Amino acid sequence: MPRKGMESERRAALVEAAIGEIAHGGAGAVTVAKIARRAGVSAPLAHHYFGSKDAILLAAMRHILRALAAETRGRLRRAETPLARVRAVVGASFAPASFREENVAAWLDFYVAARTDPATMRLLRVYQRRLRSNLLHALRPLTPQAPEVAEGAAALIDGVWLRAALGETDAPERTVNEWIEARL
Amino acid sequence: MPRKGMESERRAALVEAAIGEIAHGGAGAVTVAKIARRAGVSAPLAHHYFGSKDAILLAAMRHILRALAAETRGRLRRAETPLARVRAVVGASFAPASFREENVAAWLDFYVAARTDPATMRLLRVYQRRLRSNLLHALRPLTPQAPEVAEGAAALIDGVWLRAALGETDAPERTVNEWIEARL
DNA sequence: GTGCATTGATTGACTAGTCAATCATCCACC
DNA sequence: GGTGGATGATTGACTAGTCAATCAATGCAC
C-alpha cells in the first residue's frame, strides 16, 4: 500500500508519537521501536525518515517550540496596549497546551538533553532568546529598566512553569503578571 | 579483603559515583556497571547494597538535597536581620555547589524522574516545601504578603537557577534579591 | 565454623541501526 | 491507451552490542 507523498505525513506521525512516548514512559524509556509502533510504522521506516533516534527527538522539540511561537504570535497580534503585549507573552507560556502531560515531559527531557547535546542546546537558546526578546519589546514602553525586567521575567516564567508543571502551584499566570507589574 | 562495617563507606562511594556518572554522560547513559566501576566495586555489589538502579539514583538525589539543606541551615544561622535571612536562603540556592556540573545534571534528571516516579516526586515535594517554608519564615516580619511573595520567590529561584545552569545568565543571586526586595 | 563482603559468570531481554528485497504508484514513451 | 521502467514506501531478518539483575561460589574475619 505504499503511496507517494507520504513523507510529511509520516514525519508528523513519528514526531507526535515520539512526544507521546516520552510522556508515556519517561525519556529514558523511549525506543525507536516504540515510537514507530505508536506511529503505525516499522522501526526501519523511522530511521529511513530521520536517520537516528536523536534526530526524531530533536524534531519533536522543534515541533513543540514552533507551537509555542505560534501561540505567542497569535496573542501578540490581538494585544493593543504595551501591557497587553506583556500579558500576551506571559499568557502564551501558560496556555493550557503548555501543561499537557506530553508537553511537560518533552520540555523536561529537553532541558536534560540540552546539557550534553549541542544541537539541543542551540534549540534551547533559540527559545530563551525568543522569550527574552518578546518580553523586551513589550516592556520597553513601560519602564526604563526593560532589559533587567525582561531577563528576570523570563526566568520567572520558566520557574513558575516548572513548579506548576511538577507541583501544585495555582494561578501561575496571575503570579507572574503580578510580579512583573510590581516592577514597572 | 572483606572487612566489617564497609556498608556506609560503600554506599557513600556509590552515591558519589552515581552523581559523577550522571554528570559525565547524561542521565540516559548511566548504568549500574559504570557507577560500580567508578566507585571501585563490582556491579553485583551495588545491587547488594541498593537493590536496584533506581534506588541508587534516589539515594544520590537525597544526598544532594541534604547538602543543600545543610548549606541553608549554615547561612541562616549566621543571619541576624530578617532581610539577611531572606538573602541567606537565596544565597544557599545559588552557592557555587549548586552550579557544579554534577549538581546541575543530577537536578535536571531529578525533575525528569519526578514526573513518573512517585518516590522521586515525594522527594521533590520535600525540597519545594522546604524552600517555600524557609522563605516564608524569613519574609513574615518584612511584609504582610509573605505567603504570596514566598511562593513567587521560590519559583523565581528555580527559574533563575535553571537559566543560569543552562544558559548564560549573570549574577543570578543579585537578580533574585532585587526582585524580592522590590516586593517588600 | 559461621556469616558478611565480594565477585565471575551468566541470563534473558532489549537496543539502535543496516541491508536487501518487495510492492504500489507514477511518468514517459509509443 | 497501453506498457515498462524508475522511484518512493515499506518491511523482515539480522547484526552487534548493552543492560539490569541473579546466583553460586570464594574468601576474610571473627
Image: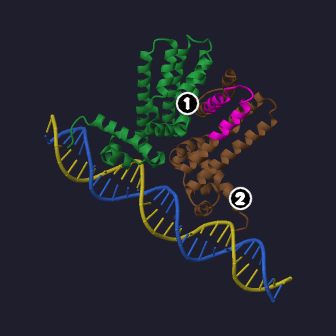
Chain colours: A brown, B green, C blue, D yellow
Residue A149 included in the magenta stretch of the image: yes
Label 1 and label 2: CA atoms lie apart by 39 Å
Q: Is residue B149 above or below residue A103?
A: above
What segment carries the magenta color? A128-157
Q: Which residue has dot 2 on it?
A: A9
Q: Which residue is mark 1?
A: B158
Dot 1 alpha-carbon crowd within 10 angstroms: few under 14, some 14 to 19, many 20 or more = many
Dividing the picture into quarters, in which one does residue B143 lie?
top right
Q: For residue B148: magenta? A: no
Image: A112 above or below C26: above
Residue B151 image position (x, y, % from top left): 59, 22
Q: Nearer the viewer, residue B46 or B175?
A: B175
Residue D30 on image: x %, y %:
15, 34
Q: Secondary structure at mark 2?
A: helix
Give whichever of D29, A170 is nearer the camera.
Answer: A170
Residue depicted at 41% across the width and 40% down the height: B19
